[in-house]
Image: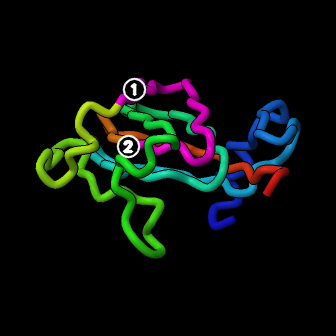
Amino acid sequence: EFVPRLSRDIEPRPFLPTRGGGLGKKPETVNFWLGPRGTVSPLHRDGRDNILCQVVGSKYVRLYHPKDSSRVYPRQGWLNTTSQVDVENVDDDKFAAFKGLEYSEVVLRAGESLYIPRGHWHFVKSLTPSISVNFWYSNNDD
């Protein structure tokens, strides 16, 4: 919307699925992310299915299952989609239930994509200068 010329170059593929049978559906939102090495997106969850595409550089992504939401210590109020836990420097006394929590992790490299289902908690850190695009899809059951 803000950079129409660039948006023509990042048209999503029509075969990207969403829960609820959204095959061929256009994304609700497209985001462009640009940042230096060390840029962090703290542990949070999105209310929409997300396909994160790495264009340049690499990112570390850590995922936690929604069933463990109470153990990631969500903030209260309108920030309840973000965690109070600093994943890189966990205060084990304050966030005892977070310790030992199972997670999946991946290093996303240029040309790779990662599907992050809605509600899954994720922490993202740029390992190099980085450009990413993500596509948020609304769900048919919303």
Q: Amino acid at mark 2?
A: Phe
Residue 9 sits above or below residue 77 on the image: above
Q: Does residue 74 belong to the magenta stretch?
A: no
- Mark 1 to mark 2 CA distance (whole Å): 9 Å
| 59, 3: nearer the viewer | 59
- Name the side, left or right, on which 87 lies relative to 31: left
Mark 1 or mark 2, which has the lower sequence index? 1
Label 1: which residue? 105
Q: Percent x, y for residue 120? A: 53, 42
Q: Which residue matches tag 2? A: 123
> Residue at the spot x=69%, y=43% of the render?
9
Name the residue located 37 percent from the left edge and 51 percent from the top edge. Answer: 41
| Residue occupying image coordinates x 78% and y 50% | 139
Label 2's element?
strand
Magenta stretch bounds = 102-122
What quarter of the picture does the C terminus occupy?
bottom right
Most foreground residue, 1 or 15: 15
Pick whichever, 118 or 97, lies toward us. 97
Residue type (three-letter) at the residue carrying disc 1: Glu
